[in-house]
Image: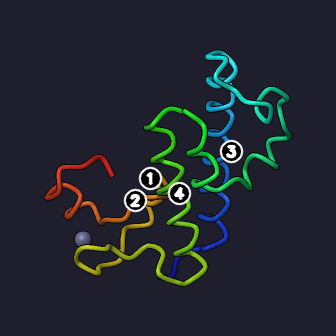
């Protein structure tokens, strides 16, 4: 049972776009936006921004963390490590990955850690 990498890559990128859209909205509302945010960019441009670039803006911490996790997951897809629990090395159930595609841990380890990931 191998993981459909392209499926999860798309899932992660979609989630990243959704987060960026929210961040953009927040930035506009808060008027914290600099020049770059003042003119709404194409969402595809935003999706290319990395966590480092985004962290220059004072944006919601939760969303930024999630974007970071998504980027880590995307790198893992490229390197072939995606879907393997960082703690115990077991394969993460694809059903779990569909719900939380950026998770680093299998369900059992996640419970042990007590985190939401
Ligand atoms: Zn595990």
Q: Nearer the viewer, residue 53 or 117?
A: 53
Decide: few, some or many residues near mark 2? Use Cα within 10 Å; few <14, some 14-19, many ≥20: many
In this picture, residue 2 sits left or right of residue 84: right
Task: Give me the C-alpha separation between circle 1 and circle 4.
Answer: 10 Å
Decide: few, some or many residues near mark 3? Use Cα within 10 Å; few <14, some 14-19, many ≥20: some
Decide: few, some or many residues near mark 1? Use Cα within 10 Å; few <14, some 14-19, many ≥20: some
The numbered mark at residue 65 is none
Task: Give me the C-alpha separation between circle 4 and circle 3.
Answer: 11 Å
Image quadrant of ligand 1 equals: bottom left
Residue carrying label 2? 103
Earlier-in-chain disc, 3 versus 2: 3
Task: Give me the C-alpha separation between circle 1 and circle 3.
Answer: 15 Å
Q: Quadrant of residue 10?
A: bottom right
In this picture, residue 106 sits left or right of residue 1: left
The numbered mark at residue 70 is 4
For label 1, the SS is loop
Earlier-in-chain disc, 1 versus 3: 3
Task: Give me the C-alpha separation between circle 2 and circle 1.
Answer: 6 Å
Task: Give me the C-alpha separation between circle 2 and circle 4.
Answer: 9 Å
Q: Does the residue at mark 1 contact the one at mark 4 (Cβ under 8 Å)?
A: no
The numbered mark at residue 17 is 3
The numbered mark at residue 100 is 1
Earlier-in-chain disc, 1 versus 4: 4
Residue drawn 68% across the image and 30% down it: 24
Q: Is mark 1 within 8 Å of ligand 1?
A: no
Could you say where residue 109 lies in the image, as x and y percent from the top left?
20, 64
Q: Does the residue at mark 2 contact the one at mark 1 (Cβ under 8 Å)?
A: yes
Above or below, comparing residue 39 to residue 41 in the picture: above
For label 2, the SS is loop
For label 3, the SS is helix
For label 4, the SS is helix
């Amino acid at each position: 049972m191998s993981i459909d990498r392209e499926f999860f890559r798309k899932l992660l990128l979609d989630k990243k776009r959704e987060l960026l859209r929210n961040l953009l909205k927040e930035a506009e509302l808060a008027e914290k936006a600099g020049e770059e945010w003042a003119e709404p960019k194409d969402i595809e441009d935003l999706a290319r921004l990395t966590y480092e670039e985004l962290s220059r803006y004072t944006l919601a911490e939760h969303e930024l963390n999630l974007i970071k996790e998504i980027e880590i997951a995307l790198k893992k897809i490229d390197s072939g490590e995606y879907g393997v629990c960082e703690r115990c090395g077991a394969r993460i159930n694809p059903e779990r990955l569909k719900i939380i595609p950026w998770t680093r841990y299998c369900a059992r380890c996640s419970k042990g850690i007590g985190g939401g990931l």
